Image (cartoon, helix red, strand yellow):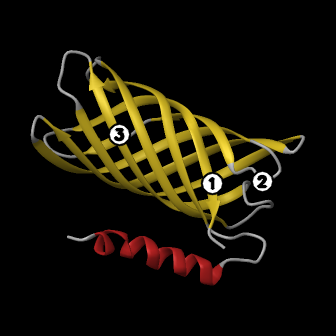
Amino acid sequence: MNVRTLFAPTLVFALALASTARADEPPHLEREWAALGAGTGIPTDHGDASLSLAEELGRHWIGDDGYEGFATGFLFDQELRFPSGGDTVANLRFQFRALWDFAIPIGDSALTLAPAVAAGVDLLVAGGQVDTAFVLTPHGDARFLFGASKQWFVYARVAVPIRFGSPSTTAEVQVLGGVGVRFFLL
C-alpha cells in the first residue's frame, strides 16, 4: 500500500468539504499533540500514562468565526499507552466526530467548551497481537484559542472510549491535555 492510497480518502473528503464551504467558513485541519495523558480502565483498575497525536479534518456548519457552533469531522487518533506493569500498547482510532463549540470571547482570544461524541474503528496493538473493535467515545473538550487568528490552542479533554469487541466490552476514563494548531484549507 502506497502513500497515495492512504491519503486518497482524506483528499476526496477535503475537496468535498471545500466545494460546499461557505465563504466565511472554510473546512479546517487540526493537529493536536497531547503533552500529558492518563487513563484508568473499567472493569480493570490499572492506570495508564499515554502520549497522543490526533488529526481532524472537519468543518463548523453553524456558528460564527470558524470556531463556535455545530461541527463535524473525521478524527484519526494515534496513541501510545504505557500501562503500569504491562507492555506498551499502541491504539489507532478512525472516528467520525460531532460536537458543539460554545465560545467565550476573551479579548482577541477565545475559550471554547464542547460536548462531543465520536464513533468509529479502534485498532489495538499489544503484545504482537492486533485487535479490531467498534468504539464509541463521548467526551468533552475545553480549548483556549490564542490571538485574532485562533490558529494555536491549548486543550484539555475528558473522554470515555467504550470499546465493543471480543472477548468483552471495555471502557476507560481518559484525561488528556496538550497543544494544537488549526489550518484552514481555503
Q: Measure the alpha-carbon separation of dots 2 and 3.
A: 28 Å
Q: Foreground: 38 or 30?
A: 30
Q: Position of residue 55 (x, y in %)?
A: 48, 53
**What element does badge 2 sit on?**
loop
Q: Position of residue 91 (x, y in %)?
A: 29, 42
Compare marks 3 and 1 and give the one earlier in the sequence. 3
Q: Amino acid at mark 1?
A: Arg
Q: Residue at x 77, y 61 (%)?
A: 63
Q: Amino acid at mark 2?
A: Ser
Q: Position of residue 54 (x, y in %)?
A: 45, 48
Q: Residue at x 24, y 50 (%)?
A: 133
Q: Residues within 10 Å of mark 3 (few under 14, many from 20)?
A: some
Label 2 vs label 3, nearer the camera: 2
Residue identified by numbered label 1:
182
Q: Are marks 2 and 3 in contact (CB under 8 Å)?
A: no
Residue identified by numbered label 2:
149
Identity of the residue furthest to the bottom in this view:
19
Q: Residues within 10 Å of mark 2 (few under 14, many from 20)?
A: few
Q: Foreground: 123 or 53?
A: 53
Q: Residue at x 73, y 69 (%)?
A: 25
Q: Foreground: 6 or 21?
A: 6
Q: Is residue 137 left or right of residue 85?
A: right
Q: Amino acid at mark 3?
A: Glu
Residue identified by numbered label 3:
79
Question: Is 56 rendered above or below residue 105?
Answer: below
Compare marks 2 and 3 and give the one earlier in the sequence. 3
